[in-house]
Image (cartoon, helix red, strand yellow):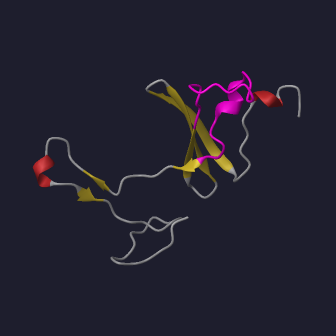
Amino acid sequence: MSGEQHLLKVYTDRTYVHTTTVRHQGTTVALAMDDQRRLVYTVLDLAHHDEAKGELDAAYWSENPLPLRFPSEIADTGFAAAGATALPVVKNGGRIEAAAGEAFRAR
């Protein structure tokens, strides 16, 4: 490990092409898109100190990034009585809506 490598958390489970970090209600979240256009996230958990992990924040990121799930329906603000609108289902890696009842496997 190089002199500063211990300061970083590196994930090697896939090839990442875009990364960013955001803060949500005081918690740091890292988001990434892989070469298959899938979004994943990991959370920096500084609330639970562990002597075995030490002081560096690199040890407090999630062990593995998780897939970022999106809702299957949306609702217009102020129109609750109208109900939610279902979003179209699109096959992985594509931009074309799947046929009604078409089964495909989640990755």
Residue 102 appears at what percent x and percent y? 40, 78
Residue 90 appears at what percent x and percent y? 42, 66
Q: Quadrant of residue 43?
A: top right
**Dividing the image into 4 quarters, which one contains the C terminus?**
bottom right
Taking 52 as reference, is 84 above or below it?
below
Taking 28 as reference, is 64 above or below it?
below
Q: Is residue 6 left or right of residue 63?
A: right
Residue 57 appears at what percent x and percent y? 68, 26
Residue 13 appears at what percent x and percent y? 71, 52
Q: Is residue 30 left or right of residue 8?
A: left
- For this orientation, the residue located farthest to the right is 2
Q: Count up the numbered dots.
A: 0
- For this orientation, the residue located farthest to the left is 81
The residue under the point 14% across, 47% down is 80
Please state the extent of the stretch shown in magenta in the rendering: 43-65
The residue under the point 46% across, 52% down is 69
Q: Is residue 89 left or right of residue 21?
A: left
- For this orientation, the residue located farthest to the top is 55
**Dividing the image into 4 quarters, which one contains the N terminus?**
top right
The residue under the point 73% across, 40% down is 10
Is residue 61 located in the magenta-colored stretch of the structure? yes
**Residue 105 versus residue 88: which sits nearer the camera?**
105
**Residue 64 versus residue 53: which sits nearer the camera?**
53
- For this orientation, the residue located farthest to the front is 51
Magenta stretch secondary structure, dominant: loop
Q: Is residue 102 left or right of residue 35?
A: left
Taking 80 as reference, is 86 above or below it?
below
The residue under the point 56% across, 32% down is 21
